[in-house]
Amino acid sequence: MAVRRQLDSRFVRLDSYDYDDPDREELLIRELYREFGGPLLRQVRKTTGNDLQWAEDVVQETLVRAWRNSAKLTWEPHLLWAWLLTVARRIVIDGRRRRGVRPREVEAPEEDSLAVPDGADRTLAAIVVADALRNLSAQHREVIEETYLRDRTVSQAAEVLGIPPGTVKSRLFYALRALRTALKERGVAS
């Protein structure tokens, strides 16, 4: 109870100063920060999702509004605390609304970091695959060429190559396995 009387008397003294006195305003803002800054910051952090920077901004704006409205405020600590909490809550709500309406701000990338599609990756991949295909046996290479590169079905490839469809399937299986191994050796496939 002694703390409350001390708080009450301190705010009564602040309230009794002349409103045009510049020392009163500095003393007022200092007392507001000392008495309410810490507890208000703890309360506001809960409502801002523990965002310390945003919470500090809200506390600062709340106490500035208290300072601006000092002539209108009731300087009883429990009423002042309730007023500060209400103002802080409204500032947080306004901030959430603003964030919901506006898109997130991001910094523009530097011109040097922008990737320009030039087809070099695709060309390089084609060269690596062609090199790996050259290392396959002739039978495996022609099965892959007919099915993948010429986009033929197994039956169509069997007809062109003059072999049974089962043989095409078998050669294709082993050809793809050999191709995968060749690409792994080149560091392309995982």
Image (cartoon, rainbow, N blue to C red):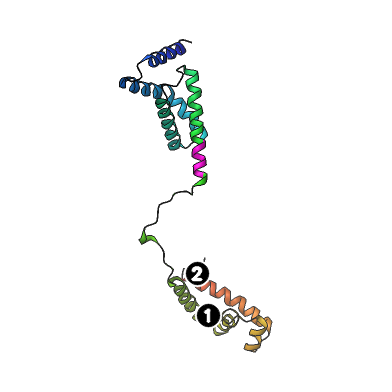
| x 42%, y 12%: residue | 9
Residue 98 lies, in percent from the top left, at: 49, 42
Q: Can you tell which mark lies on residue 187? A: none
Q: Is residue 108 magenta?
A: no
The residue tagged 2 is 184
Pick the front one: 62 or 123: 62
* Residue 59 relative to residue 167: left or right: left
What amino acid type should be assigned to the residue bearing mark 1? Leu
In which image quadrant can residue 121 be found? Answer: bottom left
Pick the front one: 56 or 184: 56
The residue tagged 1 is 136
Q: Does the magenta stretch mainly form a helix, a strand or a loop?
A: helix
Region in magenta: 93-99
In the image, residue 102 sits, relative to residue 93, either above or below, namely below
In the image, residue 114 sits, relative to residue 159, either above or below, namely above
Pick the front one: 117 or 17: 17
In which image quadrant can residue 16 be found? Answer: top left
Regarding mark 1 in the picture, which secondary structure is present there?
loop
Residue count near mark 2 (Cα–Cα under 10 Å), binned few <14, some 14–19, many ≥20: few
Residue 180 lies, in percent from the top left, at: 54, 72
Label located before the other in sequence (1 or 2): 1
Residue 139 lies, in percent from the top left, at: 58, 84
Residue 150 lies, in percent from the top left, at: 58, 82
